[in-house]
Amino acid sequence: MSALNSKQNNRAKSILAESWSIGWPMTLIMFFEFLIGLTDVYVAGKFGKEVQAAYGLAFQLYFVFIIIGIAFSVGSVSVISRLFTSRRQDEFRSSVNSSFFASAILGVCFTALGVIFSKNIIAALGIPEVLKGYATAFLTIYSVGFLFDYILLNTNGTLRACKMIKRSLWTMAIACAINIALDLTLPFYTPLKFKGIAVATVVSLSVGAVLNIIFVRKILRLTFELSKPIIKKILDISWPSGVLQVVWQLGVVAIFLILNALPKNNVEVMAAFTNGLRIESAIFLPAFAFNLANAVLVGNLLGGHKKEEAVHTGAVTAGLGVFLIVILTLVVLVNAKTIAPLLSDNALVVGECVKYIYISLAFEPFMAWGIILGGGLNGAGDTKSVMLIVCGTLWLIRIPLAFILGISIGMGAIGVWWAMNASIFIQAVLMSIRYFRRKWVHYATEVL
C-alpha cells in the first residue's frame, strides 16, 4: 500500500511540476500584457474620461480584428503540440511552416481592412459623438499593427507547443518594456498626444514579431508553404474558436452599448468598466495563462498517446490556476479602494469602478475553473464544445439578463455586473460536465 501511495504521490508531483513549468512563464507573459494595458488606461486617463472611454471601446474592436489570428493560433497549437511529441516529424515541420505563412497572409488582409474601414465601423456603433474622433484614431493606428500581431500570435503559439516557452517569455518582456517606455513618452512629449498610446503598441508588436521569427528559425523553413491537409486540420479546430472570439468580443461591445443606454452617468460608467476590466485582468492572468498551458500539456500528452494522464493533468492544472486566482482575488478586493483611483481622477468613475470590483471578483474562481478546463479541451481539438458553452451562456444569459436587470428593471450598472456573474457560474458548470465526460479524448485521436 505504501508503495502504491508513493507512486501516486510521485505522479501527482510530476503533474504539478509539468503544469507549473508552462504555467509560470505564461503567467509572466500575461503579466507583461497586463502592464501594457494598465499603462495604456493610465495614460488615456490623463487625457480625460472621454479618451479613456474611447480607448476601452477601440481596444475591444481591436480584438475583434485579431480574432481570426487568436483562433488560428488555437488550432495551430493543438495540431503542432500533438505532432511535436509524435514521430511524424515531416508533418510537424510542415505544420509549423504552413501555420506561419497562413497567419502572415491573414495579418496583411486585416491590416488593409482596418485602415480602410475604421471610421465607418466607429460611425456605425452609435456611440456618443464626443467619443467618435478619439475611437477612430485609436482603431486606425492599431490596424497598422495587425500584421505584426498575427505573426506574434502564431510564433508564440509555436514556441509554446514545442516546449520553448521561455523564448516567448523573453520576447514579451522586451516588447512590454518598449511599449511602456513609449507609452510614457510619445503621448506627453510628441505631437502625437493620445495617439501615441496606439503607436507604442504597433512599435512593440513589430519588435516582438521580429524577435520571435529569430527564435523559431530552427524549426521554421522560411520558404513559402501552405500544406492543404495541415491547413484543413488547423481550420477544423480553429473556426469554432474564431466564432467564439467574435461572439465574445461583440458581447463585450454589447455590454458597452447597454451601459451607454443607462439613463445617467453613462460615460462615467463606461470609463469605470474599462478600468475595471484592466484591474480584473490582473486576476485573469493565471487563468488565461493556465488555459494556454493546459492546451499545450494536453496536446503533448495526447500526441504521446497518454490519454488518462492528459485528463488528470488538465484537471490538476485547472486546480492550480484556481488556487492562484483565489489569492489574487483576495488581494485586489482588500485594496480595491486604493487601486481604482490610480486609473482615474474622476470621483464618480472611481466609485463605479470599486462597485464593479466588489461584485465581479466574487465569481473569479468559477471563471478560472471553466476557462482552464476549456484550454484542455482546445488542446484536444474539441473547440466546438467550448464555443457552444461560452457563446450560449453569453448570448442566452449574460446579454439578455444584463439588459433586463440594468435597463428594464432599472438596477443600472450593478444589474449588469450581476448578470455577468450569473453567466460565469453556469459556464463553469457546463464546462466541467463536458470535460469529465471525456468524449474529447476520443475526438482528439480522430482529428489528428
Image (cartoon, rainbow, N blue to C red):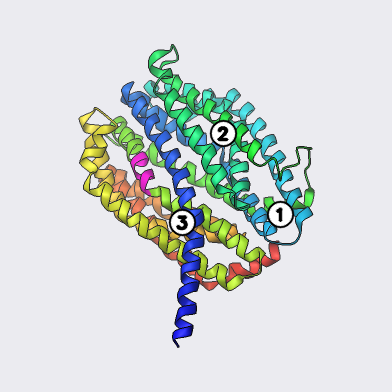
The amino acid on which the numbered mark 2 sits, given as a three-letter code, is Gly
Q: Which comes before the other along the chain, label 3 or label 1?
A: 1
Above/below status of 198 relative to 293: above
Please report the residue visible at 44 percent of the width from the left and 45 percent of the height from the top: 28
Q: Position of residue 259 (x, y in %)?
A: 34, 38
Taking depth in this image into account, of 300 and 257 the one nearest to the observer is: 300
User: Of helix, strand and loop, which one carries label 3?
Assistant: helix
Q: Is residue 101 left or right of residue 255?
A: right
Please report the residue visible at 30 percent of the width from the left and 52 percent of the height from the top: 329
Q: Residues within 10 Å of mark 3 (few under 14, many from 20)?
A: many
Q: CA distance from mark 3 to mark 1?
A: 23 Å
Q: Residues within 10 Å of mark 1 (few under 14, many from 20)?
A: some
Which residues are the magenta region?
277-283
* Residue 373: image tag: none
Q: Which comes before the other along the chain, label 1 or label 2?
A: 2
Please report the residue visible at 61 percent of the width from the left and 52 percent of the height from the top: 161
Q: CA distance from mark 3 to mark 2?
A: 26 Å
Q: Position of residue 120 (x, y in %)?
A: 54, 25
Q: Main secondary structure of the magenta part?
A: helix
Query: What residue is disc 2 on?
Result: 208
* Residue 371: image tag: 3
- The image quarter containing residue 270 is top left
Q: Position of residue 428 (x, y in %)?
A: 42, 61
Q: Is residue 79 left or right of residue 349?
A: right
Taking depth in this image into account, of 316 and 415 the one nearest to the observer is: 316
Q: CA distance from mark 1 to mark 2?
A: 27 Å
Query: What residue is disc 1 on?
Result: 233
Q: In the rendered structure, does residue 422 fall within the stretch colored magenta? A: no
Q: Is residue 104 left or right of residue 120?
A: right
